[in-house]
Image (spheres, rainbow, N blue to C red):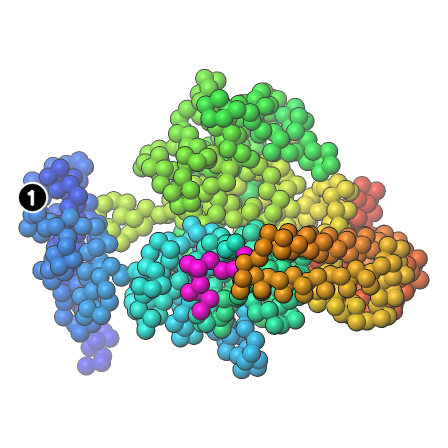
Amino acid sequence: MDKYFIENKDLPLVIAEKKKNEPRIYAYKDTNTQYEGLLKVGFTTIGVKKRVKQQYPTLKPGKIPYEIVLDESAQLDDGSFLTDHEVHKILRNQGFLNPKGEWFRCSASDVISAIKYIKSGGNIEFGRNWDFKMRPEQLNAVNITANYYRKSKNTDPDKIPQFLWNAKMRFGKTFTAYQLALEMNWKKILVMTWQPVVKSAWQEDISRHVDFKDWQFCSRDALSYAEIDKKKPFVCFGSLQDFLGKNNVGGIKSKNEWAHTINWDCIIFDEYHYGAWRDKTKDLFEQDDSEDLEYKKSLIVNGLDEDILPITTHHKLYLSGTPFRALKSGEFLEDQIFNWTYSDEQEAKENWNSKEENPYRALPKMILLTYKLPDSIKNIAMDEEYNEFDLNTFFMAKGEGDDAEFLYKNDVQKWLDLIRGSYLEESTSNLKLGSKKPPLPFYDTRLLNVLSHTFWFLPRVNSCFAMRNLLLERQNSFYHDYKIIVAAGKKAGIGVKAIKPVREAMGEPLKTKTITLSCRKLNMGVTIKPWTGIFMLRNLSSPESYFQTAFRVQSPWEEYNPDSLNPNSKEILKHRCYIFDFSPSRSLKQISDYSTRLSQSDKNAETKVSEFIKFLPVLAYENGRMTELDAGSILDIALSGVSGTLLARRWEDAMLVNVDNLTLSRLLKNEKAMRALESIIGFRNLNQDIEIIINKSETIKKTKLEANEKELSKKEKKELSNEEKELKSKRKMIQDKLIKFATRIPIFMYLTDYREKKLKDVITDLEPGLFKKVTGLTVKDFELLISLNVFNSTIMNDAIYKFKRYEDSSLTYTGLNMHGDKSIGLWDTV
């Protein structure tokens, strides 16, 4: 018998025939107007395409008059199968109109919901039709985070564990966070964000996926907390703009008091990179009885500490695709971070070797093209201090709406001519280059073929209207093939409402061409699939903003059922996407920051950049030529393409020193440290100043607590305000004095040549005499200040690295390369 099954050649044919006759539920729509908005829902065992074609016996050659939108297995787990009559019954019960026989006024998604409902035996609610599983990296994130939480609770049960997901856009943070909740058996979750536009993703996953069938979702414009069933698990979504608002005495808004009464299983902080996250925000979720938390609250003086009744939790989860600030501040240790970067994603895509469909295949590869503009265009907008082209100045406009016009209209016109390859100076260069012409966005046929829909990110609202007005002028007939969409100003809509007009203007994106102009909208938390290129036409110094905006064009774009006969087939429409930047040193600095600061590996900067640009090639245009940059070139341009003034400013960063109450208290209690600092000019009254800060902090804290019990009088409010101002002033004064001391450190670095050693070791072991001459501090005094946490080592490391890289680059013109093969010693690491 075994031999027969191995050798019988007919067996595969039998199996194939059975597979061909597998029972299927199908649905199709007819182009005939009498069936408009309706789907025919049926059952077949002869193959869906064959069965539908039988229903059109007089089919004429040419366009097929129907589109098959659904082809699903009718097989049940017990081997039996469901019929179309059962599906029809569920659809009718759900209230879908059934005007003609098997025709229903519903969508393919509704039919799938009916099928899933029947297959589950009625155990999942109608409409919950998602059943996809976690990808490998999502499963890894859940396991690593859950293990950390459990380990943390075992070793220190009183401490609230926190964890960061440094996960790029398209990671699937909402779905994965909910899977973590299932793994941890959480029942009460609070999601907080500064970007309310992300609410739909949090609501949709929990409402439609079969794994979360018992969960409830509440928010300001959905179910309220009072309406949900407290016996079932629930997620509450909140906007921090709302929750940080206070009543007239600094207390909690009455409508938000419910959130403070619950001890949450987990608080999830979404879009944690957003610029409005500050220490005052954290106060909303911190206990005030911990010195460590008090230290965090006062890390930087961004205003006054405000004591509010905190929202309490057992766990904290932070989510961000660009958590530069959190990583820079050392807020999370290595075992508190899960990393999934663009490089990780593209490497997984390239190395996928499973028989299952590659889940990353639709995620396009990004290419950055930077353009150094000809002097004849850029000279009018050069920033001498930063020694680079100022995009905000170049695209500055006057007037509003239809009357908006660029201040440098002639030069912007030259720029429009340049990007389509018709600027006279560059045209002459192109003739000399012959077939080696550089790829300009609207000139090179390889780019023209894919740039049907682009996003232009400009400085201001009137800049967007000025660009629209200029593009519509007669001389720009090339751009008249593109529909110009202005997604700026109040009329464009707020948040998710700004997306709809853009999608409507695109119509059928395979048949249209658009240019979307914006300055603040649509650059975070939104998806417009047809965008294949983004033009960075404004200054974005923050890497968070830069990459949140740039990644808008990396949304996967697939066409389902391209031939109208195979609803389960997909065709990828976007294999590559492009970032066009016209301020090269700025864009290359962002690449350097993203690849080095988000990667948590111990590799050197050049290796990190090299690994990153393997998947995001960087092409640089200058003097009519386009060349691909390597990692060394990117770092040199990024770190040396700035003025000495800008470099010096890095040593005036408020975050270099710590002036929170905890650090100041430690200083005040240490007589040796106080004597050391007071020996430096400018620190004569330090003892008195610190005492004033600590005493006033306690007084203000006490006054605010009393204000929750009774309303303060006008006089008391004025006194409180004056004390707060004096506190800020004193703290700022001490901060400034410590920064002045920190600015002497680069002088010391300039005079010593021990570059491969940690700077702390150079100061304490190798050059103590030189350090005393430059700073006025002995080594013992210096070590004492280090032990008291006066200096922020993370920020020091970053500033020293940039100083040394800049210093090396400044010597290359002499032909010297003194330190090319050596390690670079930073503040407390190498």
Q: Verify whether residue 254 appears in magenta.
A: yes
* Residue 126 vs residue 295, the one in the foreground: 295
Residue 66, compared with residue 667, is above or below; it is above
Q: Verify whether residue 525 appears in magenta.
A: no
Q: Quadrant of the C terminus?
A: bottom right
- Judging by the rendered image, the residue that carries numbered circle 1 is 57
Could you tell me which residue is drawn at 86 percent across and 54 percent down?
A: 682
Tell me residue 52's x, y (percent).
13, 49
Residue 453, compared with residue 475, is above or below; it is below
Tell me residue 380's x, y (percent).
66, 26
**Dot 1 amino acid type:** Pro
Could you tell me which residue is drawn at 34 percent across and 60 percent down?
A: 224
Residue with the most extreme top position: 474
Residue stretch rendered in magenta on the structure: 249-261
Give the class, few, some or many, for how many residues have Cα within 10 Å of label 1's Cα (few <14, many ≥20): few
Tell me residue 767's x, y (percent).
90, 62
Q: Is residue 265 left or right of residue 638?
A: left
Could you tell me which residue is drawn at 17 percent across and 74 percent down?
A: 78
* Residue 84 vs residue 412, the one in the foreground: 412
Q: Is residue 670 left or right of residue 59?
A: right
Look at the numbered disc 1 and give the secondary structure of its residue: loop
* Residue 499 vs residue 668, the one in the foreground: 668
* Residue 643 vs residue 50, the one in the foreground: 643
Q: Is residue 407 left or right of residue 27?
A: right
Camera sees residue 50: no
